[in-house]
Image (spheres, rainbow, N blue to C red):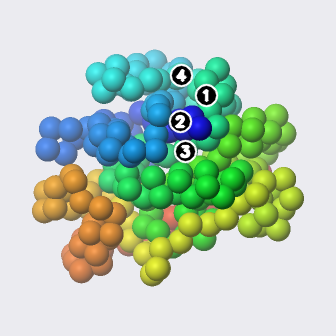
Amino acid sequence: MKVIVVTQARSGSTRLPNKVLKKIKGKTLLQIHIDRIKQAKSIDMIYIATTTNSNDDQIEKLAKELNVKYYRGSEDDVLDRFYQTVKSDKPDYVVRLTSDCPLIDPVLIDEVVTQAKERKLDYYANILEELYPDGQDIEVFTFSALEKAWNEAKLNSEREHVTPFIRNNSTYKNGTLFQSDNYAPDENYNHVRLTVDEQVDFEVIEKIVEDLGLEKDWKTYAEYYLNNEEIQELNSNITRNEGYIKSVDED
């Protein structure tokens, strides 16, 4: 089975512009993110899906430097951008990641991908019930599910955030279109924030990397966060999935 990772990246974030190009220890957050994805054993190919905006020429340049494929598409219709990225490859499964999650765990990616394949699920993710840290979000879905969503999703929130149509029509949500399930940890870590949406998030990741390096697993980073009140106070009051919540409200 062919498995392709698509990670979305753009420079035009409203809350923290050029965030994926900010550097820690001489590496951009995007490079840190890609370097960790490359360690996953279940992945056949990696794409960076960016926009046609001229500001994202630098994302294309970095993709070439990192020796990964890239696609440039719609800035707002991210579902279309994802579909166009992989439609010529027609993989069996697509793994959706976002580049504002620099410390994504390659072993966790492998666990979700392997179970999705073994259980023949249309959609398998660790976000249907948010128990993993924000910043470890992994969604795995079939190309056919992506294509159906691309054809049928109408709401702006469904187009902008790629997978809501699949999730909302999945068996986990009492839908009928897509066989799905949630991948959960043994404990609840959803109050741990390892993503970068704002400057304080970047400061948290910078501190964690300075103290622990770039090669630890998600749980080591999460436990460090939980045992460091000074770090928690920096970004613990930021709302998870704020962008998606805003999109739904605008629908």
- 129 vs 186, left or right, is right
Q: CA distance from mark 3 to mark 2?
A: 9 Å
**Residue 93 drawn above or below residue 218:** above
Image coordinates of residue 120 in percent, x first then y, are 69, 53
Secondary structure of the residue carrying numbered label 3: strand
Q: Are marks 4 and 2 in contact (CB under 8 Å)?
A: no
Q: Are marks 1 and 2 in contact (CB under 8 Å)?
A: yes
Secondary structure of the residue carrying numbered label 1: helix
Q: CA distance from mark 4 to mark 1?
A: 12 Å
Q: Tell me what residue is drawn at x 13 percent, y 62 percent.
A: 211
Q: Tell me what residue is drawn at x 60 percent, y 71 percent.
A: 129
Image coordinates of residue 127 in percent, x first then y, are 57, 63
Q: Which residue is more in the foreground, 127 or 241?
A: 127
Which label number is shown at residue 66?
none
Image coordinates of residue 39 in percent, x first then y, are 33, 44
**Residue 19 drawn above or below residue 243:** above
Q: Tell me what residue is drawn at x 46 percent, y 40 percent.
A: 43
Mark 3 crowdedness (10 Å alpha carbons): few <14, some 14-19, many ≥20: some
Q: Mark 4, mark 1: which one is toward the viewer?
A: 1
> What residue does disc 1 label?
86
> What residue does disc 2 label?
4
Q: Earlier in the sequence, mark 4 or mark 1?
A: 4
Q: CA distance from mark 1 to mark 2?
A: 8 Å
In the image, what residue type sits under mark 4?
Arg
> What residue does disc 3 label?
96
> What residue does disc 4 label?
72
In the image, what residue type sits under mark 2?
Ile
Q: Earlier in the sequence, mark 1 or mark 2?
A: 2
Q: Mark 4, mark 3: which one is toward the viewer?
A: 3
Secondary structure of the residue carrying numbered label 4: strand
Q: Which residue is more in the foreground, 73 or 90?
A: 90
